[in-house]
Amino acid sequence: MRINSPQDQTIIGESPSFLEIIDQCSRAAKHDRPVLVIGERGTGKELIAARLHFLSPRWDKSFIQVNCAALPENLLESELFGHEAGAFTGASVRRIGRFEAANNGTLFLDEIAITSLPAQEKLLRVTEYGTFQRIGSNKTIQTDVRLIGATNIDLPTAADRGDFRHDLLDRLALDVITLPPLRHRLDDILLLAYQFGQRVAQERKWESFPGFSDDMADALMQHNWPGNIRELKNVIERAVYHAEDEFTAIDTMEIDPFESPYRPRANMQKTPIEPATIEDSSKDNMPQEEGQIFNGKPIDYGQTITTIERRLLEDALKSNKYNQREAAKFLNLTYHQLRHQLKKHGLL
Ligand SMILES: Nc1ncnc2c1ncn2[C@@H]1O[C@H](COP(=O)(O)OP(=O)(O)OP(=O)(O)O)[C@@H](O)[C@H]1O
Ligand SMILES: [Mg+2]
């Protein structure tokens, strides 16, 4: 499924979890109510927010976006609500805030969880009554703005910790759209990869896009994509830019372009990163520092060996740009032995 948003961004996906979100988005767009868009990094929150606006009755009015994490606390309030001349040092002229500028349209507050508690109080007022005051003014201004908030933070937990107002959360949570991470949209990985690859092929003025080799397609499906669609896009763009010609299916990718034996040591991770997919109770017993095998606690031999085997396979794949034939050579295994091991560890 391809949906062209007026912002020249094509939203791609056909997995059931994604199509459900698209339906929910179309329904929510029609109600003139606040919406919260929640999702891990790089899952497409900005695209969904734009879609909510452009499918809404306000589509031909302004769509204003503010990234709350990009401004210091004091400037954010002035950005949102405006200020009068002389309201604070440096405020030499009156400035109209985003709530005024977005009147009759939509205001998209990205990273909304970052807002300070005083700013949240003002947000509550403006979402409830449509009123606010510029900083340094007593005059109440009326505005008609539809608010969309986005975050990758679990807001109910933030509210329980006292970092986010419960009353504002209740007000914003009239519609909550939670985007699935890419690892729950397996059907979409190759679809998205192909689309991103095709775009680069066009930029490189290739006549056609040669697609991906079977090994590369397998590797794309196996990766956990912690950075979601943004990470996939970057990896594919890099792979297609580095490809030699348009006649050979793309066969290698570089997940981490900083990976190098010459990487400055000061920047290296001190302890090995456990792959996110391993749910392994024995990881406390993995070697913590060079030269140390156990950390004093008894260890489960079988489970530890399994963890080590899996790490070897994952690292070999990574160091060989997910080319399974190269990874097999690297580990002194035959291709079939490697495939057998990958299957055993659920990596295929
Ligand atoms: N369904 C999709 N189809 C095509 N491209 C997508 C899709 N979802 C996301 N993208 C692309 O992935 C990248 C990340 O998307 P976006 O910026 O909307 O994510 P985000 O959830 O706002 O991330 P962050 O939390 O880091 O701000 C963008 O380049 C976007 O165009
Ligand atoms: Mg974003």
Image (cartoon, helix red, strand yellow):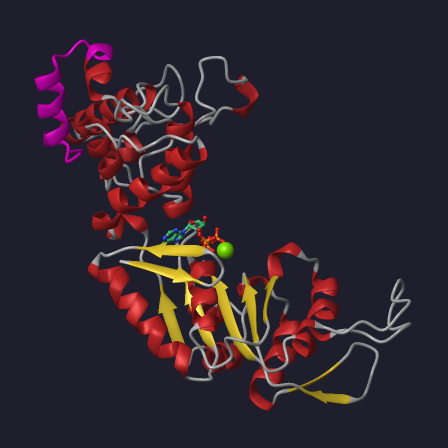
Determine which quarter of the picture holds residue 322: top left
Relative to 124, is 153 on the left or the right?
left
Asked whether 101 or 7 is in front, the reply is 7
- The magenta region covers 329-348
Determine which quarter of the picture holds residue 275: top left
- Does residue 292 appear in the picture of this structure? yes
Vertical comparison of 26 with 226: above or below? below
Determine which quarter of the picture holds residue 1: bottom left
Asked whether 285 or 178 is in front, the reply is 178
Q: How far across and down, in percent of the image, does residue 153 sit?
A: 46, 60
Vertical comparison of 139 with 248: above or below? below
Residue positioned most to the front = 207
Vertical comparison of 256 with 141: above or below? above
Q: Quadrant of the C terminus?
A: top left
Q: How far across and down, in percent of the image, does residue 84 sit?
A: 85, 76
- Does residue 157 appear in the picture of this structure? no
Residue, x 91% and y 67% (percent of image)? 92
Asked whether 218 or 319 is in front, the reply is 218
User: Magenta segment: does it hold 71?
Assistant: no
Residue, x 43% and y 37% (percent of image)? 234
